[in-house]
Image (cartoon, rainbow, N blue to C red):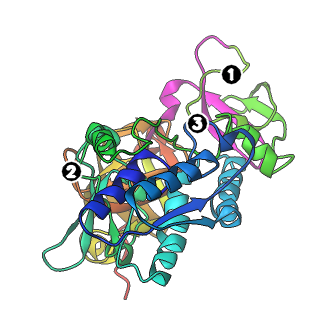
Amino acid sequence: MSGGVDSSVTAALLKAEGYEVIGVTLQLYDHGAATHRKGACCAGQDIYDARAVAERIGIPHYVLDYEQRFKEAVIDRFAESYIAGETPVPCVDCNMSIKFHDLLDTARELNAHVLATGHYVASRSLPGGGRALYRAREEERDQSYFLFGTTREQLDVLRFPLGERGKAETRELARRFGLSVANKQDSQDICFVPSGHYADVIERFKPGAAEPGEIVDLRGKVLGHHAGIINFTIGQRKGLGVATGGPLYVVRLDSERRRVVVGPREALHTRRILLRDVNWIGEGKLEQALAVGRIEVFVKVRSTRAPQPAWLTGSVRGYEVELVHGEHGVSAGQACVFYDAVEGQARVLGGGFIASTVSAAESVTRPPVEMMMARG
């Protein structure tokens, strides 16, 4: 129970359906303005809101101090990823490491049969046993992109009561249950960034991370200087501080040489993506499926984009995704999530983190990807 309307309604729904419900709130951080900032969660006022909801619906409520664990598993990884020139997705790390690992262990210690959350994603039983993950009914609320790391074992004990509902319905239910959070503002994606400026948080936890360097073009020509690559993201156009004959975008971040590489928009077009830490929750084992041939999937490389057609393959370098239409501004550190369809409540097949990309121009000259042999 984060203190928001979604998790509050989830608890109230399950209580109304006759389940024995225990509310758990995680104290994840408590630094400065984040504690009381609108749009934050899991700190300060939000903990009191969760407790008030628990009292209203008549369930026990526990607050667990996860600050140190959250710092190590989420905030530190976020900072290190940015310093390395990546664009991390901390919500994925939080779900994988904190909510569906540590909190799930706590649920088991409390002898709970299931762990329910307020995520907008659906899970359903499969005919042959087990459960599968699906996109939410309300497309604009779907959070499946942030849950690709969920394992089959976890899905067996996870429940998402809001996956088949819309946000308006959730707020109406909150009013019917008499919950004080019925009109509370939604939390932001990156809850621990008080000011909205990532560089400020990184400097706080990793002092000296903002090392100055050069801004160069695709040929290595120095165009200007910067105060630290943590102030830039792939695809960024504004705030570069350099002027040429045409618009320039951040194409690559070279952390080793502290260089920001800029170029025209067409240089951002990506066709091939190399993945790391791939999680597969589709049918069977991924290696066996790839031994037969490449897999046709639909992928999202940003949470706000619709899935697009792609091919998932394997090679000696690891797993690769070839985007049929390509994509602009794909960055290392982001998630690439697999689906079995492009529209409706498509099934989530898994995903991975983007390790590197190959531009559309480079992709044309590369040989076909060798298929990965089945492993024992």
Kindly report which numbered mark, 3 or 2, lies closer to the viewer in this rendering.
Answer: 2
Horizontal and vertical percent for residue 186? 46, 39
Dot 2 amino acid type: Gln
Dot 3 amino acid type: Ile
Q: Quarter of the image holding residue 219? A: top right
Residue that protrudes farthest toward the bottom in the picture: 376
The residue that mark 1 highlights is 239
**Which of 324 and 66 lies nearest the eye of the viewer?**
66
Which portion, as a residue range, is magenta?
244-271
How far apart, in angstroms, are the residues tagged by discs 2 and 1?
39 Å
Q: In this view, does 120 lie above or below 198?
A: below
Sequence-wise first label, 1 or 3: 3
- Taking the magenta stretch, the answer to whether it contains residue 103 is no
Name the residue: 42% across, 54% down.
56
The residue that mark 2 highlights is 345
Residue that protrudes farthest toward the right in the picture: 208
Dot 1 amino acid type: Gly
Secondary element at image label 1: loop
Q: In this view, does 193 lie above or below 333?
A: above
Horizontally, residue 230 falls left or right of residue 168, namely right
Horizontal and vertical percent for residue 70? 64, 61
How far apart, in angstroms, are the residues tagged by discs 1 and 3?
13 Å
Horizontal and vertical percent for residue 304? 40, 38
Secondary element at image label 2: loop
In the picture, which quadrant includes the C terminus? Answer: bottom left
Q: In this view, does 134 lie above or below 97?
A: above
Sequence-wise first label, 2 or 1: 1
